Image (cartoon, helix red, strand yellow):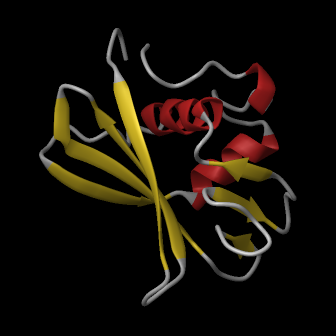
């Protein structure tokens, strides 16, 4: 990823489905975005009571990740890059974020280090 500066936003929608999303984009090309979507469902929990804004969790893994934390965002960015998910074309490219979450919380991916020891997102 070189010296690329990455920006991110976190959002949440309640209709028609309850979902939280993490949008990643390069600072120099803000119209080419990867949006990782986390839908609420069986075994999957997104922001809302009793969790805070940006929290996602799986009842199976038990790990709560907060998408507002730079180190967590960096782990998702690294995993998305490893999977070839970073878009090159203009537009918003939606991807299911749960497979990345599963990899990060089971310690199998390149960004699976402990949250406290992870590098921060921002520049690379």
Query: Is 122 located above or below residue 30 in the figure?
Result: above
Residue 81 quadrant: top left
Image quadrant in which the N terminus is located: top left
Q: Is 4 on the left-hand or right-hand side of 92?
A: right
Query: Is 106 located above or below residue 102 in the figure?
Result: above
User: Measured from the top left, where is residue 22 in percent x and y?
Assistant: 46, 52
- Residue at 74 percent across and 61 percent down: it is 57
Residue sitting nearer the eye, 7 or 82: 7
User: Measured from the top left, where is residue 31 in percent x and y?
Assistant: 16, 44
Residue 87 quadrant: top left
Residue sitting nearer the eye, 26 or 2: 26
Q: Is 55 on the left-hand or right-hand side of 11?
A: right
- Residue at 71 percent across and 71 percent down: it is 45
Residue 104 quadrant: top right
- Residue at 25 percent across and 28 percent down: it is 27
Residue sitting nearer the eye, 68 or 93: 68
The extreme bottom residue here reads 16
Query: Is 12 located above or below residue 87 in the figure?
Result: below
The extreme top residue here reads 3
Numbered circles on residues, count: 0
Image quadrant in which the C terminus is located: top left
Q: Is 111 on the left-hand or right-hand side of 58?
A: left
User: Measured from the top left, where is residue 40 in percent x and y?
Assistant: 62, 77
- Residue at 82 percent across and 52 percent down: it is 63
Residue sitting nearer the eye, 43 or 29: 29
């Amino acid at each position: 990823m070189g010296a690329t500066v990455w920006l991110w936003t976190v959002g949440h929608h309640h209709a028609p489905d309850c979902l939280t999303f993490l949008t990643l984009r390069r600072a120099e090309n803000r119209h080419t975005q990867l949006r990782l979507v986390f839908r609420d469902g069986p075994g999957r929990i997104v922001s809302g009571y009793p969790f805070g804004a940006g929290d996602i969790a799986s009842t199976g893994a038990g790990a709560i990740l907060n998408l507002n934390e730079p180190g967590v965002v960096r782990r998702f960015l690294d995993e998305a890059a490893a999977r070839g998910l970073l878009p090159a074309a203009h537009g918003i490219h939606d991807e299911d974020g749960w497979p990345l979450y599963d990899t990060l919380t089971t310690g199998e991916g390149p960004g699976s280090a402990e949250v406290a020891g992870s590098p921060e997102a921002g520049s690379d």
